[in-house]
């Protein structure tokens, strides 16, 4: 739910009519970032607040019944199709390239999927990208077993640079000085995913990968190769919350930070 900071940032940029040639989202960054390509300002905040207390959206009950804390059918197929419709037509017509990142459970490597349209399969890619280990079922797409993209590539700046994007904007949900620690749930990870040693290795080394990526992002920022928008302090929220007030607070922090740096961002993008 730290991704509500991202929602605040991107809604502000959409309101200011900032247009990008390409975008990539990881985990919540994919599920919320897609609203940029569909031009749906406010949608990410709106449906999260509306269903924050709904057990069909996110609950232990859903985890026990289905294997997914965030209910796969409700979150990725009922909500965006019936309850707060995702504008698939606008997403498809918008020329911005949009990528999502998932982790291949067999190889422990990142998978980058370019989505030109959404539909059932596209929503499943969003689900795969955000499916946290231990509280999510493995998602099978294109013959691959997939989970949370943040395990293999948390901040895919290098990937976008390799696609030819020279001026980039990197939105973080942790402060610049954040240092990730080892995953305390490794005993449970090893037990549950014992058939997938490469995945276990990726989770075990994630903190090293993440910290290296953070150093790279900040180095690129100093050299003027990316513009970083990050929370000024740790966000007052965790992976999961049932409080609409907390969601609003984190969203507002994102808006405030985007507004604070907007003039500098315009100069960078000029």
Image (tube, helix red, strand yellow):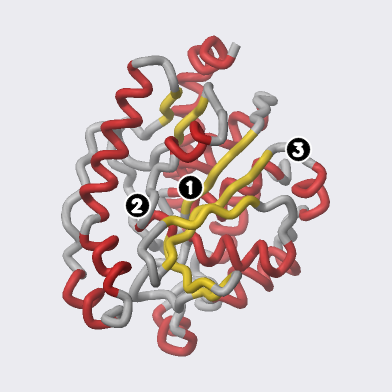
Where in the figure is residue 113, as x and y percent of width and height?
58, 54
Marks 3 and 2: CB-CB under 8 Å?
no
Between label 3 and label 2, give the one nearer the viewer. Answer: 3
Q: Which residue is mark 3?
A: 95
Measure how far apart labels 3 and 1 are at the Cα level: 25 Å
The image quadrant of residue 219 is top left
Tell me how far mark 3 sits from mark 2, CA to CA.
Answer: 34 Å
Report which quarter residue 212 is drawn in: top left
150 with respect to 39 (left or right): left
Q: Earlier in the sequence, mark 3 or mark 2?
A: 3
- SS for callout 2: loop
Labels 3 & 1 near each other (Cβ < 8 A): no
Q: How many marks?
A: 3
**Label 1 with label 2: CB-CB less than 8 Å:** yes
Q: Which residue is mark 2?
A: 237
Measure the alpha-carbon separation of dots 1 and 2.
10 Å
Q: Can residue 40 be seen at all in this image of the molecule?
A: yes
Relative side of 52 to 12, left or right: left
Q: Mark 3 or mark 1: which comes first in sequence?
A: 1
Q: Nearer the viewer, mark 3 or mark 1?
A: 3
Which of the numbered marks, if any, corresponds to residue 21? none
Q: Which residue is mark 1?
A: 4
């Amino acid at each position: 739910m730290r991704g509500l900071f991202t929602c605040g940032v991107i809604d502000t940029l959409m309101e200011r009519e900032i247009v990008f040639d390409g975008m990539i989202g990881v985990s919540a960054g994919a599920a919320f970032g897609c609203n940029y390509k569909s031009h749906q300002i406010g949608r990410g905040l709106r449906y999260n607040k509306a269903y924050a207390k709904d057990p069909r959206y996110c609950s232990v009950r859903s985890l026990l019944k289905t294997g997914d804390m965030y209910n796969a059918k409700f979150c990725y197929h009922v909500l965006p199709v019936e309850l707060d419709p995702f504008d698939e037509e606008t997403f498809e017509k918008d020329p911005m390239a949009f990528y999502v990142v998932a982790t291949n459970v067999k190889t422990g490597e990142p998978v980058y999927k370019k989505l030109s349209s959404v539909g059932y399969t596209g929503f499943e890619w969003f689900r795969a990208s955000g499916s946290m280990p231990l509280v999510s079922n493995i998602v099978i797409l294109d013959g691959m077993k997939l989970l949370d993209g943040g395990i293999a590539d948390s901040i895919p700046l290098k990937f976008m640079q390799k696609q030819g994007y020279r001026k980039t904007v990197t939105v973080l949900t942790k402060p610049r000085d954040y240092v990730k620690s080892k995953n305390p749930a490794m005993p449970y990870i090893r037990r549950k995913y014992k058939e997938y040693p490469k995945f276990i290795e990726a989770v075990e080394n994630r903190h090293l990968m993440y910290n290296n990526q953070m150093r790279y992002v900040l180095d690129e920022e100093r050299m003027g190769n990316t513009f970083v928008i990050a929370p000024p302090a740790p966000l007052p929220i965790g992976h999961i919350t049932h409080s609409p007030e907390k969601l609003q607070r984190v969203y507002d922090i994102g808006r405030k930070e985007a507004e604070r740096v907007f003039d500098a961002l315009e100069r960078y993008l000029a």
